[in-house]
Image: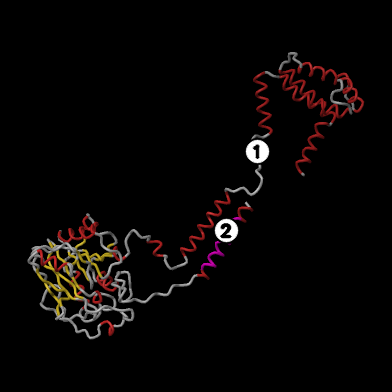
Amino acid sequence: MRQRLTIILTIVVIIGVLALISSLAYVKKEKLPDYEIAPNRSTYHSGPTGVRALHDFLNESGYRVIRWKETPQKLLTDSGKLVKTFVIVGQVQVRFTDAEHKALSRWVAGGGHLVLIDRNPEQDHDTAGPGSWIITTKRTEFPSFDVNPADVNQMTERVLAFKPVQPTVLTRNVQSVQPSRFASRLNIHMVSSASERSSTTEENNSLTGLETTGSPAPVVHLLDDKGALLIDFEYGMGRVSMLTDPYMVSNGGINLKDNLQLAVNLLTAADGLIAFDEYHQGKGLTQNSIAGYFAGTPVLLLAGQAGLVVLLLLWTKGRRFGRPLPLPQVDRRSSLEYVASMAELQQRARAFDLAIENIYTRTRRVLARHAGVDYNSSRTEIASGIAARGTIDAQKLETLMRRCEDVINGQPCSWRESIDLVRRLREVERDLGLRMRAREEKQAAENI
């Protein structure tokens, strides 16, 4: 137990030293500033380029809103049927695959509302056919690294507020909105022939991967001389809304003018659950949420060091650091149990001669030692030596020894006679004090 306690204390000390070293060596990473050229449009991000303020406002205002962390294919399952509005904000970190485009198109065509807020929506080369509406984007200005997204003056320099073109559901209670100077514009025109479609899509590809063949013309809600800022159009039984400036819904610009009201109108146009796409922002369920939660802290390093210590202990536990030693053989039986077992076996087998032999052999050895003669000496010599040193009759002792040897050599003996012989041998030991002396020596040896 003392050795185990030493090992446990050693492990605790080692882990404590490792924890101390990790804490001293840990350097907290500085929080990198947001850049408009490389924004983070996640609803988890509280910086000026994030969308956390809009998400939290909707949630606290009683709207049903979630963070969608699965692929768009899940929108076609039973759980996806609850989602009525699917929101994609800004430049995604994980690109859409063809299968995800098709799944999203099916979901919108089935009655969903897709809200796409981006300055350069993802494009598809083979969506529009003759009679389709072609929607193209036009970038007016690109952000640089020296632009601070938290500085309203830099973001809205020389940009006038937009007023709604017409009263619609999306512009309800909106007097004016303030986009950034990096907002792109949308141009809409109809392709009447396949040749015109081919020449057009080589330069400007249709947006979102959605076919608009035979659909009514898109509705323009915000417009200036450079193009449209906000449009929406029908797609199957659903609808697609496109806003070309994520700054208007980001943490840095949501509080300007009526940007918040426009965002609320845009996301709540279809009653039901609102899902922000976090899967393509790099927050999918495939990532290790526990590791992500402790990222940037010394917890992961401490866990790795503790695991290393455990592996080291397991490895050393199975290693031999010295010569092999045999396992100790512990006799689990007590002496009394052994004696009782042997007595019962001899009684059942009526082996009285064996019982007398076990006792007489020891008694003869003790008598020979007491008489001062050799063990192989005759009975007469042993009896004479005993008689010379005590009060025991030599003839009676010799007769007793002869009878015991006769029984051992095969002469018949009843159980009563065997008991009588054993009793007489014990009396000789008692009279000579041999049995008592042996017991005292044994007790003295046990007490040492």
Residue 260 image-quadrant placement? bottom left
What SS does tag 2 mark?
A: helix
Is 37 situated above or below 107? Answer: below
Measured in 3D between alpha carbons, the distance from the residue under mark 1 to the one under mark 2, in whole angstroms, is 32 Å
- Left or right: residue 257 versus residue 439 is left
- Taking the image as shown, residue 45 lies to the left or right of residue 6, namely left
Q: Which residues are magenta?
A: 7-22
Q: Is residue 268 magenta?
A: no
Q: For residue 330, which numbered disc appears in the image?
A: 1
Residue 21 is covered by the magenta coloring? yes
Q: Residues within 10 Å of mark 2 (few under 14, many from 20)?
A: some
* Front-most of residues 52 and 410: 52
Which is nearer the eye, 274 or 1? 274
Q: Position of residue 293 (x, y in %)?
A: 39, 65
Prevailing SS of the magenta stretch: helix
Q: Which quadrant of the figure has residue 333? A: top right
Q: Which residue is mark 2?
A: 11
Q: Secondary structure at mark 1?
A: loop
Tell me: residue 36, above or below residue 366.
below
Residue kind at label 2, given as amino acid type: Ile
Left or right of 447, for residue 82: left
Q: Which one is nearer the viewer's eye here, 174 or 210?
A: 210
Question: In which image quadrant can residue 232 be found?
Answer: bottom left
Residue 92 against residue 7 in the figure, above or below: below
Depth check, mark 1 against mark 2: the one in front is 2
